[in-house]
Image (tube, helix red, strand yellow):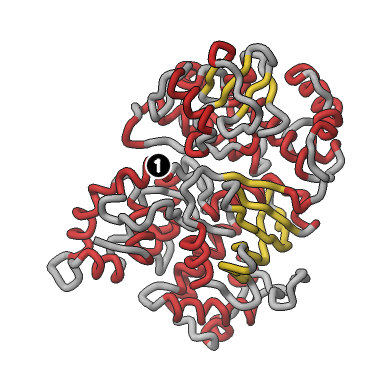
Amino acid sequence: MTSLPNSLDDKGYYQALLARDARFDGHFFIAVKTTGIYCRPVCKVRAPLAKNCLFFNSAALAESQGFRPCLRCRPELAPQVLPHWSAQDASQILALQASQLIERAVRLLKQPLSVAAFAQQLGVSERHLNRIFNQHLGVSPSQYLLTQRLLMAKQLLSDTTLPIHQISKLSGFSSQRRLNAVFIHQYNLTPSACRKGEQTTHQLSNITLTYRPPYHVQSVLNFFSLRAINGLERVNKNTEGTASLARIFQIRVDGNSFVGWIELVFDEQANRVKVRLSDSLMPVLPAVLQQIRWALDLDADCQAIDTLLQSDFPNCLGWRVPGAWDGFETAVRAILGQQVTVAAAKTLTHRLVKSFGAPVATPWPELTLAFPSPETLFNASPDELGKLGIVKQRQKAIQALANALLHESLDLSPGPHLSKTLKALMQLPGIGDWTAQYIAMRCLRWPDAFPSGDVVIQNRLGVRGLKRPALQATEIAQKWQPWRSYAVIRLWHGDSL
């Protein structure tokens, strides 16, 4: 078995299994030789004997050895594992980047889904990608891709009432017949039998996303609440013992825009988020779920992050970096937030949404407007934007950003294109290092972003007013690499040095 970042041996894996330790969820899977089934370490079934267990660091590796996923703990719900950049060699980082790229492509409905296309995006040959994938992950890229498709199909079968022919399309299969054939070959089950085997009522409100603890729910909701725009979003930090967030949600897939609403309810005891959403978003459900995972930072490995940051931020265990619900929306809000307070930026954004937002029907009378699209803001006149209090420099920045997205010269989603995107952002008028780093942190999900020119950060670090404060802030922050984005959130909203 390929070693895990925590370097546990089989005895350690088995102890984590006996403890049902959710901190290891997604880091490894347990296959039981006597049943032919593999599970997550949090599975609540009776623990098998140690001699009957095999341990794998990915679902794809377990499936390549002939095991099928447990219908109870559902391996498709396990949080993703992100690279530990500072502890791995270049080929291992590339292998993990490739696996993330495959997972994202399946969830974001990207085409074409081929090993050659992934290799091209990563700038390597297909042969090299196959070699490093087998070396570090124990399976081929094509096997990994197939497992991701199957697990996506399994989640949709379990959590939705979508017809199987639509699920086959959403999970990347060419037809329902192809999905049936692969399911039978891989799992010895038909898709319909898999759906019947789940002990759930198939309602759309049952869609589940999981995370590894610790997860400080209130800090994430406080962040969104502080920036919530009337008409667009609302946050209930504590309503009858539950924490929830509802907002109007829009996403662009293959050049088409889908708009609707989502409601997220945290179940902290079970380390999961329950998702409810409008029918208008169902045709792109996997992409919506992936964007929610990014926005809530559900896949962060806080055990590794807190180990590095805890000495400087002892009261911020489990804090995450809130991401973007929509890359364009967050980038525009970053531009409006240049050199002003959070409250002032919120006021400007509210005016923008009220003037240019499109009406959307939701279950909540206070949520009525979607954030303006790139087309809308690109075509807005300077006079219209100026009346809202948006100065000319920021008008140009917003419209240049919209133009870049409309012409697909800019990609504001996470991926291996980080340096290219940062360079493209910095070339737009009115976007400097602070804005680019902010976008990298929230939209691109870069864990090591650091806006060194931020006034609050400089004040918290005690370098404001000194000579070259941005450089001194950067030097202080070096000890927090590769998790400086997480330090930024703690400096902004939590305990500091």
Estimate the x, y position of residue 182 in percent, counting from the top left. 77, 22
Q: Is residue 279 above or below residue 39?
A: below
Q: Is residue 119 visible?
A: no
Tell me what residue is drawn at x 62 percent, y 27 percent.
Answer: 39
Could you say which is closer to the camera, residue 435 or residue 194?
194
Estimate the x, y position of residue 59 in percent, counting from the top left. 60, 26
Q: Is residue 261 above or below residue 21?
A: below
Q: Is residue 158 left or right of residue 263?
A: right
Q: Is residue 212 visible?
A: yes
Residue found at the very far left of the displayed protein: 467
Tell me what residue is drawn at x 64 percent, y 26 percent.
Answer: 46
Q: Quadrant of the C terminus?
A: bottom left
Dividing the picture into quadrants, the one containing residue 241 is bottom right
Tell me what residue is drawn at x 68 percent, y 26 percent.
Answer: 69
Q: Is residue 227 above or below residue 66?
A: below
Dividing the picture into quadrants, the one containing residue 382 is bottom right
User: Mark 1: few, some, or many residues within 10 Å (few <14, many ≥20)?
Assistant: some
Looking at the picture, which amino acid does disc 1 mark? Gln
Estimate the x, y position of residue 28 in percent, counting from the top left. 52, 27
Q: Is residue 261 left or right of residue 211?
A: right
Could you say which is closer to the camera, residue 392 or residue 47?
47
Q: Is residue 59 above or below residue 364?
A: above
Residue found at the very far bottom of the displayed protein: 387
Estimate the x, y position of residue 354 in percent, counting from the top left. 63, 81
Label 1, on which residue?
A: 303
- Where disc 1 sits, the SS reads helix
Could you say which is closer to the camera, residue 493 or residue 439?
493
